[in-house]
Image: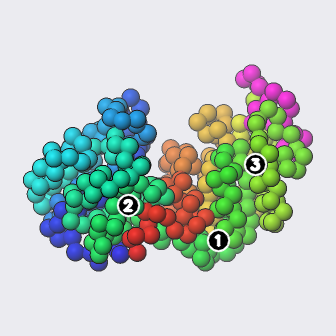
Amino acid sequence: MRMVDLPVESKHVLVRVDFNVPMDHGQITDDSRIRASIPTIEYLLKKNAAVILMSHLGRPKGEDPQLSLKPIAKRLSVLLKKPVLMAPDCIGPQVEQMVHALKEGEILMLENLRFHKEEEEPNEEFVSGLAALGEVYINDAFGTAHRDHASTAQIARYFAGKRAAGFLMEKEIAALKPLIENPKRPFHIIIGGAKIATKAGVIQNLKADVLYIGGAMAFPFFQALGISTGDFPVSQEDVKLAQDILNSRKNIHLPLDLVIEKEKEIKTILAQDGVPTSWHVGDVGPQTILSWSKYLSVAKTIFWNGPLGIVEQKEFANGTQSLARNLAKSHTEVTIGGGDTVGAIQKMGLAKDFFHFSTGGGASLEFLEFGHLPGIDPLF
């Protein structure tokens, strides 16, 4: 159900958001996930709802003050220009009292869900305790929709006829579903990053016309073709996955040249010559970007997940940045599939130049592979 079709006026509305933002010594370094939730929150406030927000942050082992949602509540208060109350926990009598006292148009932030192991390992007591806090349930946390956790999936059964997707969730589904069902063609996919096992399913499921493989993802493909990747460890299982993709797909582009490093010496080599022993690959080279940009220019739809190099290091960020600049100038519908690629492009100030930025890396990949997710299925 869509949120606009759900009666929320003057209700206590329990909203699962994804405020798992990057932090550095207690300071938020990127608040884009918080900002992404604001349309849903503001809509509920205009309907005079009492809004109860719940999220996780990080991977705490029990209660951890460093992973409290207090800084998130403060940032949200600034963005909304109104107070955000902070609960001492996410369940329990004290939280229930705060919820009961919450007035229409007020906001309460629950403490980190993962301070309780039952969030990830749900039991009836914990799930029912969360569900008791709201009259209506909204899931706006696409970034965690692939998790069958208490607050993302299990809780939905307590809200039959009273649950819906938030605006962010709707936006993500609307942008990603056409890539599965009927993308505008030519449809090209760029896959970078490191984990072929988590992305092979997407590659096989999406019927792309052209596929580009960069980053450490390219190493198993090189080894399958008998090209050395230096000292980078590649499992035989990954090589077999790469070989299966090479056998089943046409029009696959691997990097033409690579930027490699050894003891602070950096040079560019042709990929077909292989990576010498004791050298490490940091990025794709300029020939790759030139060639890929030319082929990508004819695409009508592009999906990109994963950087082409070690973007955290300036000397190895050029491939990802150069390709992003070229795509930003195009008129192609480019969807950035979450993760490190989103962060790299946002730092360049190019976010507004792309068709869609997904807030969920793992979630977007699993949705594109399977077409549904545990956190989405109960909503529609």
Mark 1 or 3, nearer chain start: 3
- Horizontal side of 177 relative to 317 (left or right) equals left
Task: Check disc 2 and report its element: helix, strand or loop.
Answer: helix
Specify the amino acid type for callout 2: Gln
Can see residue 250?
yes
Question: Is disc 3 placed on a helix, strand or loop?
Answer: helix
For residue 379, what is the image quadrant? bottom left
Residue beneath disc 1: 300
Q: Residue at 32% of width from left, 56% of height from top?
A: 124
Q: Which residues are magenta?
A: 262-281
Residue 336 seen by the camera: no
Front one among 252 and 9: 9
Earlier residue among tags 2 and 3: 2
Residue assigned mark 3: 238
The answer to whether marks 1 and 3 mark residues whose Cβ atoms lie closer than 8 Å is: no
Horizontal and vertical percent position of residue 63: 33, 34
How far, Cα to Cα, is label 1 from label 2?
39 Å
- Describe residue 343's horizontal placement relative to residue 272 as left or right: left
Q: Residue furthest front?
A: 124
Q: Residue at x 38, y 52 (%)?
A: 122
Q: Are marks 1 and 2 in contact (CB under 8 Å)?
A: no
Above or below residue 276? Residue 21 is below
- Which residue matches tag 2? 154
The residue mark sitting in front, 2 or 3, is 2
Let me know if residue 277 is in the magenta part.
yes
Is 362 magenta? The answer is no
Q: Colour mode? A: rainbow
Judged by depth in the image, the label closer to the viewer, 1 or 3, is 3
In the rendered view, tell whether residue 323 sits above or below residue 39: above
Query: Distance between the Cα atoms at labels 2 and 3?
Result: 34 Å
